[in-house]
């Protein structure tokens, strides 16, 4: 079985899988919501309390008002971008949540230095929960969505 350099072969399917480090251009290595992060020796990054599900109590009465809130969640969005070209870039995080208009703050200018393989960010958010369903943070670099992190909301 042959494989190209920089590729891994899955023996179960005999398909060639391209490794993430061989991708051309910038890409999202990972993105997740978590309660806490900690940077340790050797730049090791630890995520605690990874959030993929947020449960809210069943309301005792039907919600009232135009924009009822079932709860809110304080979370860190941890993500890593790799493969960008040196220079200035525009980074933006857009939050999509059921019942809430798309929240897209102004883009942040970041500088990617020569020789940098990847950069990590941790952004803190307070996300209001108005409806059940999938809540998403879309990571946008230079006007192009490159990936997302999400969690589900359901009644406990």
Image (spheres, helix red, strand yellow):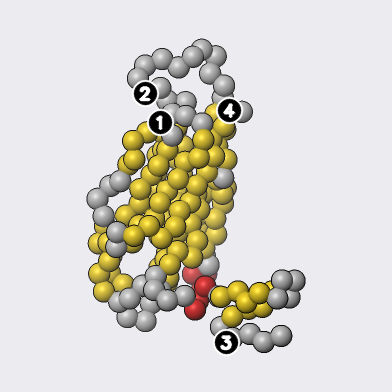
Which one is closest to the eye, mark 2 or mark 3?
3
Residue that mark 1 sits on: 99
Residue that mark 4 sits on: 155
Q: Which mark is residue 79?
A: none
**Separation of disc 2 and disc 3 at Cα?**
54 Å
Sort mark 1 into few (<14), some (14-19) or many (20+) by Cα contacts within 10 Å. Answer: some
Residue 58 position by quadrant: top right
Residue that mark 2 sits on: 67
Quadrant that contains the N terminus: bottom right
Residue that mark 3 sits on: 5
Residue 69 visible in the shown view: yes
Relative to residue 123, is residue 44 drawn left or right?
right
Of the numbered discs 4 and 1, the one sitting upstream in the chain is 1
Of the numbered discs 4 and 3, the one sitting upstream in the chain is 3
Relative to residue 103, is residue 42 drawn left or right?
right
Sort mark 4 into few (<14), some (14-19) or many (20+) by Cα contacts within 10 Å. Answer: few
Decide which of 68, 126 is in the foreground and name it: 68
Decide which of 151, 2 is in the foreground and name it: 2
For the point 44% across and 57% down, which residue is it? Answer: 147
Decide which of 37, 28 is in the foreground and name it: 28
Residue 54 position by quadrant: top right
């Amino acid at each position: 079985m042959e494989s190209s350099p920089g590729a891994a072969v899955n023996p179960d399917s005999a398909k060639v899988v391209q490794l993430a480090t061989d991708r051309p251009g910038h890409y999202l290595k990972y993105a997740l919501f978590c309660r806490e992060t900690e940077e340790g020796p050797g730049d090791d990054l630890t995520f605690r309390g990874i959030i993929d599900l947020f449960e809210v109590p069943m309301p005792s009465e039907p919600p009232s008002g135009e924009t009822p809130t079932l709860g809110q969640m304080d979370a860190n969005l941890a993500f890593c971008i790799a493969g960008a070209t040196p220079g200035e870039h525009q980074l933006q995080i857009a939050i999509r949540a059921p019942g809430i208009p798309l929240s897209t703050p102004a883009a942040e200018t970041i500088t990617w230095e020569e020789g940098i393989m990847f950069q990590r960010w941790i952004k803190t958010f307070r996300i209001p929960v108005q409806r059940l369903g999938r809540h998403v943070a879309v990571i946008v670099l230079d006007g192009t969505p490159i990936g997302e992190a999400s969690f589900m909301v359901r009644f406990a």
